[in-house]
Image: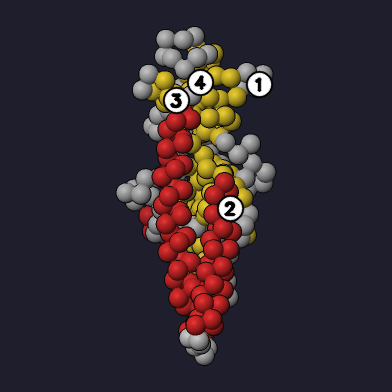
Amino acid sequence: MSKLIRILQPTPIYTEHSLSSRKIRDTAVDEYIPYKRIKLREKVRWYEVILDNEKLGYVRKDNTTVFKCSYVELEDDESHGFNYKLKTDKTLDFNAVFFPKRDLVPVDDDSDNTTVKNVEVKQIKDLEKNKARYIDLYYNKNTVEVERFFFNKKEKFHLTYEPDYSSKEVLIEVNNFKDKKGYLLKKTNHGLVSDKWMTYLSYVIITICTVATFLACLATGWLVIGFVLIIPGIIIGFLIMLVLQIAISILKGIFNEIYVRL
């Protein structure tokens, strides 16, 4: 299901969209729950979630306890990430396992340079032009087991956690709920699957405007040799596309505000 929430902190599921209604159960950290829609009742927003028995429940929308996952499609040529599993019974935070520099990794002895390993997290925007960015993270191989994976362009997955834009964190969490889950670079380019139609529409608009400009110039005798002729059409196409995107974003916002109140 494309609509999912991820539980960041335990929070209850209610029978109704009211804090005074009966609790169905408490959720667990890292639990994924499908939802139908968001509702606004008494100035409180609620996720209308789908339970195992196909019945509906309600989880209060709170960004500190619940993360709304986005179903996205990769726009870069490739994106390389990783997941990990601790080899110890201790509960260790991510930042206590992975480090930006080799000499920061806590080890008893690494005289032979085999204990500290690195994993490369990489974003390849363009394979042919070799446009890429990456970071290396270092870890103790006796503490953690690392599994690498990568996505190809147009592969779809859920964005299961994304830090705030102001955050210094450089990774996002993803999951395709098949065989790939873990961490990618925060700057990975991806787009909402639900908005892909806008991309195709923009191509159509630019093509129509370019052809229309060419025909108009041809009809008036303003013939220009070479590719200079298509520039006005492309500019007009981009301007129309920008106006449409702004208008659609405004309309979506209005309709969403109406819909959550229904």
Does the rendering let one see residue 114? no
SS assignment at label 3: loop
How many residues crowd around disc 4 within 10 Å: few (fewer than 14), some, or many (20 or more)? many
Mark toward the viewer: 4 or 2: 2
- Amino acid at dot 2: Trp
- Amino acid at dot 3: Arg
Label located before the other in sequence (4 or 2): 4
Q: How is the image coloured?
A: secondary structure
Q: Are marks 1 and 3 in contact (CB under 8 Å)?
A: no
Label located before the other in sequence (3 or 2): 2
SS assignment at label 1: loop
Question: Which label belongs to residue 58?
Answer: 4
**Residue at horizontal 50%, vertical 58%?**
189
Q: Which residue is mark 2?
A: 197
- Amino acid at dot 1: Glu
Q: Which residue is mark 3?
A: 261
SS assignment at label 4: strand
Q: Which residue is mark 1?
A: 54
Q: How far apart are the alpha carbons under marks 4 and 2?
A: 31 Å
Q: Position of residue 212 (x, y in %)?
A: 54, 72
Most extreme residue toward the left, as rendered? 166
Most extreme residue toward the front, as rendered? 220
Label located before the other in sequence (4 or 3): 4
Q: How far apart are the alpha carbons under marks 2 and 1?
A: 30 Å
Mark toward the viewer: 2 or 1: 2
- Amino acid at dot 4: Tyr
SS assignment at label 2: helix
Q: Are marks 4 and 3 in contact (CB under 8 Å)?
A: no
Q: Position of residue 151 (x, y in %)?
A: 61, 56
Q: How far apart are the alpha carbons under marks 1 and 3?
A: 23 Å
How many residues crowd around disc 1 within 10 Å: few (fewer than 14), some, or many (20 or more)? few
